[in-house]
Amino acid sequence: MNVIAKPDALTSQVVRHVDKSFDWDAFPSNRGYAELARAQMRYIGAGGSPKVGEPGTIPPQHFTLSLIHKPVGNYAACHAHEIEESFLIIAGVLVVGWERDGEVCEVKLGPKDMILNARDVGHGFRNDGIEPVLMSISVDVGKPLPPRYLYHPKLGTDPALARSFGAAPGRTIPFDPHGDHPLQQAMARNVIRHVEAPAIREAAGFQRRVYVGPGGVESDTCRKEMWGIPVGCAVKPHARPVEEALMVLEGNLVVGWEEDGVAVEKELGPRDLVFHPAGRPHWFRNAGIGPCTAWCVVGEAGGETVRFEAA
Ligand SMILES: [Fe+2]
């Protein structure tokens, strides 16, 4: 096959970070509350924002994917969803709280750490750090319902109580995987620390750390993994029965498709994303001079079905 570089179907499924803009008005319920301000950049679907169908954003199937920027000192009011939602930290340190009956368990998450917010569990987040937080949020359904706010200044919640996600003084519990409080135990099942997640070494020459799926957080919706792809690693064409998204976090990655018997390739840099539709044969290789780290979201639960082969 020849590799060509003309406008193609792959181009329409690559979202470049520099082609997107952060939206400071993505969440109408935050309007008028400076301490709740955050910015969203939509890659796949609209997530929890009502701004669906935006040009340049890929229509969602089984999940959405966006970036969220949270300034120092700001928080997101405690709310719940009908579906699971993951926060993957890219930069900074984020405090995430889970609330139940006026008690809140808080965890601090750093770069490449993730929490899968369980269905119908009240959750909020806050940036108590010294740098903005950048994270990738995926909701595990194409078009989620609007969030149900549990503690929000607009509901008349006291501002201090809203900032602590609904915990009155003395009712905040620290995250502890060995703690015996039900909230601690529930949260511990849904937090993945990057450095603690086991690395699966693929014979094709890269490694996968399962965040959501068998070996990681249990889920019946989507699988989410962190891939480490060394320089020179190349994987043969493969396809899935569902969609897959890859967002590069570090390094560069060449991704390719077969289109009518012709090979088409694009190189992705940090915070660029490719969306592989169901059934589309695709491949990747690291043609750069440093390792690539990529966040992978697959639109089905269960274990990996692809047999990766070195190219
Ligand atoms: Fe949420």
Image: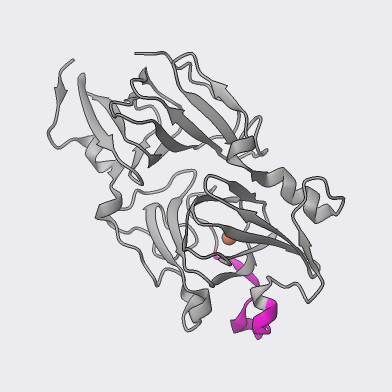
Residue 134 placement (x, y as % from top left)? 46, 57
Which residue is found at the position 47% from the left and 31% from the top? 227
The residue closer to the viewer here, 225 or 307, is 225
Q: Is residue 303 visible?
A: no
The extreme front residue here reads: 130
The colour scheme used here is one colour
User: Quarter of the picture for ligand 1?
Assistant: bottom right
Residue 206 placement (x, y as % from top left)? 46, 22
The residue closer to the viewer here, 124 or 143, is 124
The verdict on residue 265 being magenta is no
| Up-down relation of residue 231 to residue 27 (above or below) | above
Residue 238 placement (x, y as % from top left)? 39, 20
The extreme right residue here reads: 180
Which residue is found at the position 43% from the left and 36% from the top? 294
**In-image side of 204 versus 141 (left or right):** left
What are the residue bounds of the magenta stretch? Answer: 146-161
Which residue is found at the position 27% from the left and 56% from the top? 55
Q: If the image is split into quadrants, where does the C terminus sit?
A: top left
Q: If the image is split into quadrants, where does the N terminus sit?
A: top left
Residue 171 placement (x, y as % from top left)? 81, 70
Q: Is residue 192 visible?
A: yes
The verdict on residue 158 being magenta is yes
- Where is residue 205, by image quadrant? top left
Q: How many marks?
A: 0
